Amino acid sequence: MKKITLYLISFLILSLSFSCKRLTFENDPETFVKDRYSKKEVAITMRDGIKLHTTIYSPKNTSEKYPILMHRTPYSSRPYGDDQFKKRIGPNETMMKEGYIIVYQDVRGRWMSEGTYDNMRPYIPNKKDNSQIDESSDTFDTIDWLVKNIPNNNGKVGTWGISYPGFYTSYSTIDAHPALKAASPQAPIADFFFDDFHHNGAFLLSYFKIIGLFGTPKDSPTDSAWFKLPDLGTKDQYQFFLDAGPLSNLNKYYEYKEVDNGSYLNQTSIKDFFWQELINHPNYDELWQKKSITGHLKADSSHVATMVVGGWYDAEDLYGTFETYKNLEANPSNSYNTMVIGPWDHGGWAREKGKQLVGNMYFGDSISTFYQKNIETKFFHHFLKGSGDDDDSGLPEAYVFDTGKKEWKTYDEWPPKNIIKETAYLSESQRLTTKQASIKAIKFISDLKKPVPYSEDIKTVFTPRKYMTDDQRFAARRPDVLVFETPVLTEDYTLAGDILAKLKVATTGTDADWIVKIIDVFPADIEEQKAGMQDHLKLSNYHFMIRSEVMRGKFRNSFSHPEPFKPNKITNVNIKLQDVYHTFKKGHKLQIQIQSTWFPLIDLNPQTFVPNIYKAKERDFKTQTHSVFTSSSIEFTVLK
């Protein structure tokens, strides 16, 4: 029974790694990989003596030389054993059939690899000796061994990965091995204070259940899950976290207790270091800053062509996708760098289900297949099998999907050249206006006993995704959600780039969260979708959320040095929302929603300033009255 339980846990967690998700391929027998590829497992020794488990799939046809495609993962390179084969290998079906040497590796400290795991190991520049290692050196050492020891390789290597493996892919471009010619970071984690577990200082409570996946160490190589996930005992996560109260009440799920000096001790022999990191580092301090990879992507990697891939509705690593692209684009070496953003949730481009849906919204058919065949395969083929000429890749700088018109567009740069900034102001009459009205306060009560849900669905999920396109009518009709919208549009209106909310706010407390949502309100007489919509909803008057973001108020001026609000004093709170590419069609309306709770996507702000929210007590949580002033504005990037 224990073995079965461990298998089920492993299977459930592996489903989070979209790099490991099974793709849907047509007309291929289940034995294709075993019939066409040979498999070999090796332990590659790193410069410090640690051995990393590596699985190599090589084409049985040895009449030609093949490039190497490598995928480094913390989620397991299973199945283990030379006679056990994956059903599908590589980034997509076309590349699997075309022929590449496909390599999977368990990163340091995970599964069958030796060493100590760090969930975002800091980069070490100018390493002094072989004892100084990071993911860059492990990648370098692995590639060096591969090109020297795998028969029939053509001396060119590519890397790819989605989500956490996307982080390792980004890392591969730093101090890169000369054989590394192409890398595709896809939905890459870039900074754990802004990706996945935090958004602008707010803790993503919805990720609480999977913390053990990222923070439980192991003593030796293993092919079975060694971590545990807490059993919440309910399918209603809203009620569970509301009843649980302050974050400190959740310590028991990771077996911690607080001691007299205010720190936390583990009650077992296994220490979940990630929960410990979260508790002891509530601000953007040196720990998180060192883990961030974005600032190092400007290193000279001119010989590595990159293609950053992401989804407009990626609830996990949208920040990482854009920050990775923008930092690579700022690379002084001016290396080849392209971006692909489609109508997908996290990792959706690696799956094909025919109709492309995110939540209730339908975007078209076979969109992932189009990407895999016409973009991803073309990129790797050109740089690993073709000329590798930066000027002749056949791909644009930016391949982006307009989520309003539901069509692909290409641009020579992102954001496009022909954009302007336009500002909309909030008004007391719930309108968005082009001119600022007289300054007035719009007040609402933020009751922590009845926080605004992030979704009307009742369920418990590991990582929420559907909410990114959810109908927001349920929120618009609450008194603690402010609504502002344009008149019915008389012509199409396209946003192409980031959005900046410049709020002027006040609160009776000393802290507050501020959430801004951008919404496309559909007309009442719109033609209904033929598939994908939840039974209780209609597209008529659907409030389609395009983008959303939170700012924990105490971090409004600095993520490293939080500051309390002065009660009832007008205060500036700026919130940058990630890029969008969306056309609000003629007959639609553009709506803004502003609120202060978003539960349990994020944890509850006590609404009184506390130095460390993970140690806040029940008495710190208070209902407050918030004000948003009509001098607030939203700055849009508009395509003309």
Image: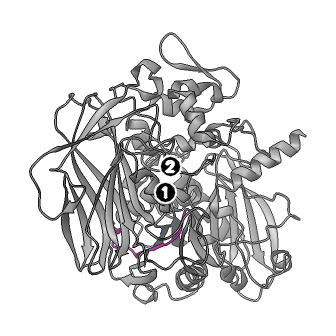
From the viewer's perspective, is residue 60 above or below residue 557?
below
Query: Does residue 451 sit above or below 407 in this rendering?
Result: above
Distance (Cα) linking label 2 and label 1: 6 Å
Q: Which sits in the foreground, 398 or 624?
A: 624
Residue at x 86% of width, y 63% of height: 82
- Using the image, tell me which numbered label, if any, was put on residue 317: 1
Compare residues 127 and 445 and report the one nearer the observer: 445
Q: Are marks 2 and 1 in contact (CB under 8 Å)?
A: yes
Decide whether residue 213 is among the magenta residues. no
Residue under numbered circle 2: 196
Farthest top residue in view: 260
Q: Residue at x 33, y 77 (%)?
A: 587
x%, y% of residue 285? 37, 36
Q: Earlier in the sequence, mark 2 or mark 1?
A: 2
In the picture, which quadrant includes the C terminus? bottom left
Which element type, helix, strand or loop, lies under badge 1? loop
x, y (%) of residue 388? 49, 84
